[in-house]
Structures are given as structure tokens and as C-alpha cells.
Amino acid sequence: MNKFKLFIIIELVLLVLLGISLIRNPFFLAVLGLGLFFAYLSSRVATWTAQQVLRQIAIAFGVIALIMFVADGYTWLALLFPVIAGIIFWKSSGTTYTSVNDPRFHKSEEAGFERRGIFDNQSENAVSRLSGNDVIDLGCTTFQPTGNDLTIKKASGNTKIIVPEDVAVMLDVTALSGVVKIFDDITKVNAEHVRYMTDEFGTSDKRIRITVHVGRGNVEVVKG
């Protein structure tokens, strides 16, 4: 499970706990209900003076309900968790080095990168993260007869894909902001959507379809 999915799950759990905490508070429900009731009455009476009085009463109950909402501990957890998680993700958004099916799988403390396989089984053909730089090395890839698929998704960060000389590629790159450079053939700035396919893709025994979605960051595809 990637960090972004874990963040969403935890935030949803906190919101559910907040809802349960408020529902189990009878005083909060009574205040909220009275506020809504007086707000409804203010829209039904005919005289302007009565409308203003009822609206002021409804606002008063609404302020009390808001204070109780803010005072709930789960409210602060739900508000502070995204801030804390964002700081942690930002601090840990270094460069991840991915070497596909590389038996030398390891994490180097000196270099500050993690090497991991992504084609070890068919369910692990994606690199997904909130932010950070990635280097994808296809040098040790085990290719399937029908070709391989690789998907890279992230909100921000640079991406470099190293493709061996004998591998054919089909690329579908979406980068809202940044430079997209594919070999020595294409270089585009803020192009948003770039497609590319090598001439031998249909006949090559080693071929891979790569889809990249990045909000902000450079995408570079090189031979190596």
C-alpha cells in the first residue's frame, strides 16, 4: 500500500470517528437541531421583524454548535493529520531508484535510494507516490511474450526511465508542468500530453508500454 492510499484511509477513519463522536453527543444534536429549526421558522414567517429575531436565534445556536464541533478532539486530529503527513511526505520525498527484477535488491543508506523490483509478479507493475524523484531502470526486466506494462503516477517530482538498447517502447506521458524528453527524438515543455512509439515496437520480442501521469515534474526517457 502506498503512502497516499494510507493517508486517505487514516483521514477517512478520523472523519468517521468524528461523526460518531458528534452523533453520540445529545447536547450537540439538540443545539444543532434547534438551530436548524429556528432557521426553518425564519423562512416561513411573514413579518420582517420576526424573521430577523428567528435568524439571530438560529445563528446563536449555530455558533454554539460550531464551538462544540471545534472543541471535539477528533476535529483537531482530522485537521492536523494532513499537515503532519504532508510534512513527513515532503521530508521523505527523495529519489527512489527502481531496478526491475534486479537480483541485487537493496536499499543503500549512502546513496539514499531504494532499489526494488516491480515485475516480480503481474500485480506489481506500477510506481505510485505522492511526490518525489524516481529513476526506473529496465535493464533487468523479464519480458512477457505479449509485452509488459508499467504505470507511473505521482503529483510532483522528476522521473527518469532507463531503457536498454534492444527494448521497444510505447509511451503515453501526461505532465501538466515540466519538460518531457524522450531519447533524442522529442523535447517538449509543458506539453501536457505526449505519445511516442519506437518503429520496431510491433515486431520486437522485448517491448513495454509505459504510462506516466505527473502533475508537476520533468520526465526523461534515455537509452542505457
Image: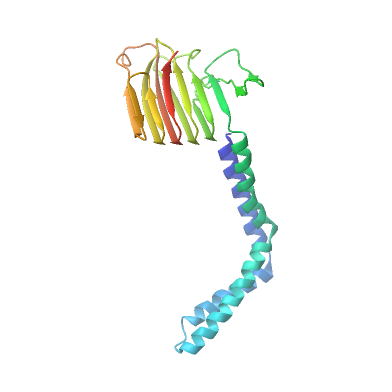
Quarter where residue 200 is shown: top left
Q: Position of residue 113 (x, y in %)?
A: 60, 23
Q: Is residue 7 above or below residue 45?
A: above
Quadrant where the N terminus is found in the figure: top right
Residue at left offset 45%, top offset 25%:
150
Name the side, left or right, on which 114 lies relative to 152: right
Q: Nearer the viewer, residue 193 or 148?
A: 193
Q: Position of residue 199 (x, y in %)?
A: 29, 15
Q: How many marks?
A: 0
Colouring: rainbow
Q: Is residue 45 above or below residue 62?
A: below
For the question of whether residue 124 can be seen, the reply is no
Quarter where residue 57 is shown: bottom right
Q: Position of residue 25 (x, y in %)?
A: 68, 66
Q: Nearer the viewer, residue 78 or 33?
A: 78
Quadrant where the C terminus is found in the figure: top left
Q: Position of residue 205 (x, y in %)?
A: 38, 11
Residue at left offset 37%, top offset 28%:
172
For the question of whether residue 177 can be seen, the reply is yes
Q: Residue furthest left?
A: 199
Quarter where residue 222 is shown: top left
Residue at left offset 51%, top offset 28%:
127
Q: Is residue 12 above or below residue 179?
A: below
Q: Is residue 140 above or below residue 26?
A: above
